[in-house]
Amino acid sequence: MSAAKNNDTIDITVDFSGGLEMLFDNKRRYSVSLPAVDGSGKPVTMAFLIDHLCTHLMKDPRVDLFVLDKHIRPGILVLINDADWELEGEEAYELQPRDNILFVSTLHGG
Amino acid sequence: MARALCANCKTERAVIKRPKNHAKLCKGCFIQVFEDEVHHTITSSQLFHPGEKIAIGASGGKDSTVLASVLKTLNERHGYGLELVLLSIDEGIKGYRDDSLETVRRNAVQYDMPLKIVGYDELYGWTMDQVVETIGKKGNCTYCGVFRRQALDRGAKMLGIKHVVTGHNADDVAETVLMNLLRGDLARLSRSTSIVTGDSRSEVKRSKPLKYSYEKEIVLYAHHKKLDYFSTECIYSPEAFRGSARALVKQLERVRPTAILDIVRSGEDAARLVPGEEPSSCACLGQKAAAGVVVDDDVGGCGSQSGRTPGGEMAAMDKQLRDNEAHEGLEIDVTKTMAKGAVARGEKRDVPIRTGNASKGAPRQVLGNCKRCGYMSSQEICQACMLLEGLNKNRAKIQI
Ligand SMILES: [Zn+2]
Ligand SMILES: [Zn+2]
């Protein structure tokens, strides 16, 4: 992959399930376009994505059901291309084009 | 980033990091080990016998869907000889169960299992919507939970089934252990850890085959097996106390993932100190399932068939119900169940064991049957009948 320029973007898909979709307009899948680098010129990470989702995608005011104390709420699982993000560096993971990110709640009843 | 390989097969890419031991596994190995562990729980606790008819309390949610899928798989793989049936409850909340019952109907087809749906109206003469109309939203979760507990038993009885399994997982058990610890209710703490509840006097036995399964792994199992499940929130307000206990469990898990099973084990160990309360556990510990047969009053609240007990409002109801019980003395001599060693050393231990929210005495709940409906109850009149009496009085008033 060539070095990212300031106006490059990365296209990924973001899925919500296990009840989290209720916080995101009851839509389970979003195509998300992110700048390839953040404000300080570093490649965008999961932390950037989570912030982006909170500010741009979430309409529901109950942000704390998704992010608590600036981190993903305990009980929400994050999969990066189907692998537990704990195996991928969690918030520090650098997003790649066509990544699939799944947020799935374990907190909801059924 | 270098991709870790599965610790088991060492060929596939690891996609799971197990909370209980940090093992990194691939999808296939994870599914296998998850099923093997449930099989171990089932066989070591001698949960089933060949030819037994089992009703799976099914809500369409993740826990009961995974339970149905795993039981079907294990029944076929290991020749349990079980007859599996899905049993669902319709509380009669307009719109609330539509999607989940649709999911259960699909599950019945997917797993090729018969499905029985029973409504609160046919069981109690009241739908939850009618309850809410009568008493308002406050406290209705209590009614919902108390009714649901018996609903599964009654539904099972209708089907001629004597054993109901529910999707309670390790997180649920840990959460209940913490709640009872925080309430100072050691007797109930012991019951909450038991894998089997109900006894020969109760017509229906209950068990939780997923008692040692992490909620995280249940959700991952459902995801990787692409199971069809439904998630919802209770449409009425969630209760603060259980919610706090749940948040605490999840926060502890983040810092130290083994904490969940450690809490479950602490609950089991503490249970051994309560007179007359022996929890069943893995037979690796040398106990038969029958030893752990106790009254299960861990009723579920709204939002999950597998039981999210409403906490705060339940407390008030508890108190009200307890006032109808005969109280025994506060002090219970624990020496009879203490380890022999301690007794041999001549140490007399009088540890007062309290139950309930307050210092209000310690009713050792004894197995019996409700004088009205005949269901297993630790009180003369069961909770459901108590609540129904109040409701029916209200209905009479309204009609006048
Ligand atoms: Zn493997
Ligand atoms: Zn009764």
Image (tube, rainbow, N blue to C red):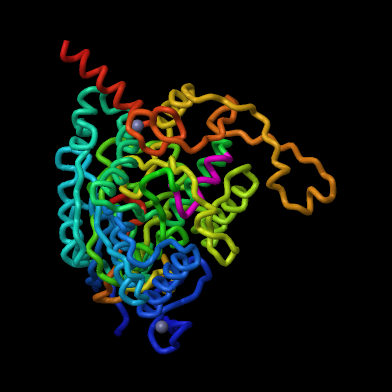
Rendering coords of residue B130 (x, y %): 19, 28
Report the span colored magenta: B186-198
Q: Can you say whether B319 is above or below B282 in the image?
A: above
Q: Quadrant of the N terminus of chain A?
A: bottom left
Q: Position of residue B222 (x, y in %)?
A: 30, 66
Q: Nearer the viewer, residue B282 or B175?
A: B282
| B75 left or right, relative to B8 | left
Q: How many marks?
A: 0
Q: Estimate the x, y position of residue B206 in percent, counting from the top left.
A: 39, 51
Q: Is residue B75 left or right of residue A90?
A: left
Figure quarter occupied by ligand 1:
bottom left
* Picture layout, residue B363 above or below residue B67: above
Q: Kindly give the residue lying farthest to the bottom in the view shown.
A: B11
Nearest to the observer: residue B281 or residue B129: B281
In this rendering, the answer to whether B189 lies above or below A96 is above
Residue B256 visible in the shown view: no
Percent x, y for residue B307? 36, 46
Q: Is residue B164 left or right of residue B270?
A: left
